[in-house]
Structures are given as C-alpha cells and as structure tokens.
Image (tube, grey):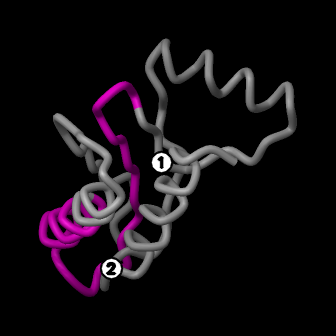
Amino acid sequence: MTADDDVLTAVETAVLAVPGVSELYHARPTLSATIETAKRLATRTALARVVLDDDVLRIVIGTDGARPAPETARAAHLAALAVAEAHGLALSRVDVRVARVG
C-alpha cells in the first residue's frame, strides 16, 4: 500500500461518514488512472473507490435522500478536501458526482 493508498482510504472513510452519503461508488478514471488500475488488478491490489487523477480527486456518491443531494455533495467535497490537505495532498479540484439520490 502506498502513501496515496492511505490517503484514498482516509478520504473514503471521511466521505462515508458524511450525513446523507449512503454509498460510495467506483469513480471512472481517466486514461492515466486507468493504467494504474490495470497495474493494481494485475497485482491483485484492492482498488480504491475514489480516484486520484494527477491532482484531481474523483468521487461518486449515493445519497439517502434525507438531505438535499447538492448539500450532501458539498459536504462530501469538504470532507474529502480536508482529509487530502491533512495528508499533504495538493489538489487542483475535488470532483464529487451524485450517482443516486434516495
């Protein structure tokens, strides 16, 4: 497990702890992340559900419908950003998408 793996695991944990987030789905990686994913599959390393594409963190969530989806997505964004910053990960963007509401 690399330092990035530790950060991604911490981000997953933080996002799942956000009120209103009911599920975390595998984010679709771009080409550079796809190559990394293929390497992980070849070595049977666990795949993170959040994806780090260079300096962009990609997250896909499902919500429970108790809170408005945009509010939940914003809270997930802030939680992910706080964890990344706490681990010294410099990001240009955190991309949170809502795949399912309620």
**Quick check: marks 1 and 2 in contact, CB under 8 Å?**
no
The relative height of residue 48 versus residue 77 in the rendered view (above or below) is: above
Mark earlier in primary sequence (1, 2): 2
The residue positioned 32% from the left and 64% from the top of the image is 83
Which residue position holds label 1? 50
| Circle 1: element type | loop
In-image side of 75 versus 29 (left or right): left
Which residue position holds label 2? 18
The residue positioned 62% from the left and 44% from the top of the image is 2
Q: Which residues are magenta?
A: 53-80
Q: Type of residue at label 1?
A: Val
Q: CA distance from mark 1 to mark 2?
A: 15 Å
Query: How many neighbours does mark 2 have within 10 angstroms: few (below 14), some (14-19), or many (20 or more)?
Result: some
Query: Where, by quadrant of the figure, is residue 11 drawn?
Result: bottom left
The relative height of residue 18 versus residue 62 in the rendered view (above or below) is: below
Query: How many neighbours does mark 1 have within 10 angstroms: few (below 14), some (14-19), or many (20 or more)?
Result: many
